[in-house]
Amino acid sequence: MSVDYEKLAGFFRVHYNEESSKKMSAYMKNKFEFIGLKSKKRRSLAKDYKNKYEYFSLEDIQQDAIEIWNLDEREFQYIYLDYLKKNKKKLTEDSIETIEYLIANKSWWDTVDLIATHLVGELFKQYPHFINRYREKWQDSNNIWLQRSLILFQLKYKEMTDEALLFEIINKNLGSEEFFINKAIGWVLREYSKTNRAAVETFVEKTNLSRLSKREASKYL
């Protein structure tokens, strides 16, 4: 085991800030508890902890993920995702099941969007056969966070974007009444419009997008 989770939790919890904790929890619709650590402080403490004690290891990714996701305060999920993001190019094929677990559990936009755009994006780039393997599974899962991840995984691909695949995935999600699905559609189209404005403009004109998706997609058009 790479990490003493009890020691890790205690190291951060001594910095509990009630005022910040309440504000951060309210911002997340009171879905999660918070210690009250802002990003800069959290990352500074994580660096201190890493220098003093044993830290995460990709060899223990499944165990670490489950243990960290079981901790109540949201900062612990952020700490672990910071680690995975920093090491995303070292993820292996076996990592995908853990990444799927992180998307589908304790789900909200704050973790899912980072996982989708950085971790899923990197894994699908390294192992393109994953796209066909997980496209139908995630689309048919009735889990909006897996579906959102499928929409967003190419967000940072720019010229590497598979345009046909992007539009196909969006078309599969048309008619959704889920805010987070329609927001994701608009977001990914808006981002892709920076690379291929004409293609997005044509797609937006010809596609029956939700008002939210169309508004978001059209920001730079």
Image: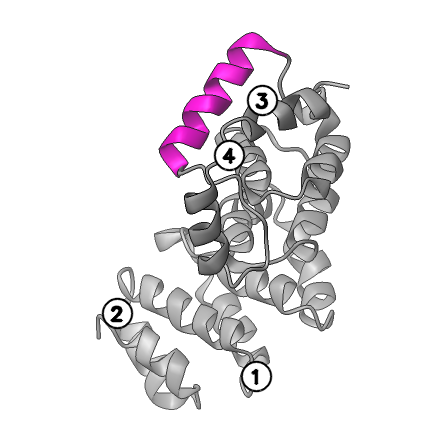
| Residue 115 falls within the magenta-colored stretch | no
Residue 87, x across and y down, in percent? 53, 29
**Residue nearer the viewer, 142 or 92:** 142
Image-quadrant location for residue 221: bottom left
The CA distance from mark 1 to mark 2 is 25 Å
How far apart are the alpha carbons under marks 2 and 3? 48 Å
> Which badge, 3 or 4, is on the more N-terminal residue?
3
Which quadrant of the view contains residue 39? top left
User: Cα distance, mark 3 to mark 4?
Assistant: 10 Å
Indicate the amino acid at tag 1.
Ser
- The residue singled out by tag 1 in the image is 176
Quarter of the figure with residue 40:
top left
Name which residue lies at 31% across and 80% down: 215
Mark 1 or 3: in front is 3
Which residue in the protein does label 4 denote?
Answer: 16
On screen, 133 above or below 72?
below
Magenta residues: mostly which secondary structure?
Answer: helix
Residue under pointer 2: 197
87 horizontally vs 140: left or right: left
Badge nearest the viewer, 2 or 3: 3
**Badge 4 amino acid:** Tyr
Q: Cβ–Cβ below 8 Å for labels 1 and 4? A: no
Which comes sooner in the sequence, label 2 or label 3?
3
Amino acid, disc 2:
Arg
Between disc 1 and disc 2, whose residue precedes?
A: 1
Residue 6 to residue 182: above or below: above
Residue 47 image position (x, y, % from top left): 47, 19
Q: Residue 217's x, y, as percent? A: 33, 74
Q: Is mark 3 on a helix, strand or loop?
A: helix
